[in-house]
Amino acid sequence: MRRLLIVLMLAGASALAQTPPSRNRPPVPGFRPGPAVQSAEMAVKQAMEQLANVRKGIERDVEVLNRLRTADDSLVDNMQPSNAIQKAYDQVEEAKRLGPDFTVMQGVIKIERELEAARRSPLGADFGHLRSILRDEALGPASRVVARNALRLQEETLAWMKIQELIATHVRTLSEIAGESLRAAQK
């Protein structure tokens, strides 16, 4: 008897698992989502695509900033001047390869030239001067670009939160209207 009960329970569970979920119900005849729903959905999809492109740019700017910080850190160790200059030069070259913002690129090119000159005579290199140029001309602008991006994202986040509130109000109104209609239909 127990085995039969277990078999019936398993058969019932598998039958329930095979039934489509309630959200896959056939549409109500004659009902289609309105153009407002479709345009809102398209707007959200477009915003997501734009965000993916913006994200790539922001990640690039953060990577440039990290490379320039690493270059600055490598110039702190002046006990082995050739190694320090080479490490900084490699990081600046990598930052340049990433294609930073125009103002950052100008500073990267300037520090790149200074590091090339320092590579020719590493023992006479003025590390304080190199770090000063790196910080003022490349690292400072890169930091400002990243901060500007963050502020833009914060503003956009607040705008999307306002949109979300509007959508919630609209959905609440739709639900109230639907509830009133169903109550009226049941009378």
Image (cartoon, grey):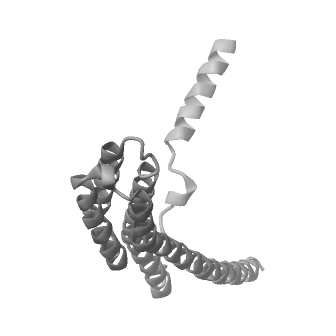
Which residue is rendered at x = 42% and y = 49% of the image? 74
Quadrant that contains the N terminus: top right
Q: Nearer the viewer, residue 154 or 164?
A: 154
Q: Quadrant of residue 164?
A: bottom right
Q: Position of residue 129 (x, y in %)?
A: 41, 65
Locate residue 88, reporting x and y percent: 35, 53
Foreground residue among 171 and 154: 154
Label count reads: 0
> Considering only vertical position in the picture, is 111 above or below 8?
below
The answer to whether residue 174 is left or right of residue 98 is: right
Q: Is residue 24 above or below residue 14?
A: below
> Residue 110: horizontal and vertical position, in percent?
30, 71
Q: Residue at x 59, y 33 (%)?
A: 13
Residue drawn at (41%, 57%) of the image: 127
Q: Is residue 171 left or right of residue 37?
A: right
Residue 145 x, y percent position in the rendering: 45, 74
Which quadrant does the C terminus fall into?
bottom right
The quarter of the picture where residue 175 lies is bottom right
Residue 30, can we see it? no
Q: Is residue 102 visible?
A: yes
The foreground one among 36 and 61 is 61
Q: Quadrant of residue 105?
A: bottom left
Residue drawn at 47 percent across, 64 percent down: 26
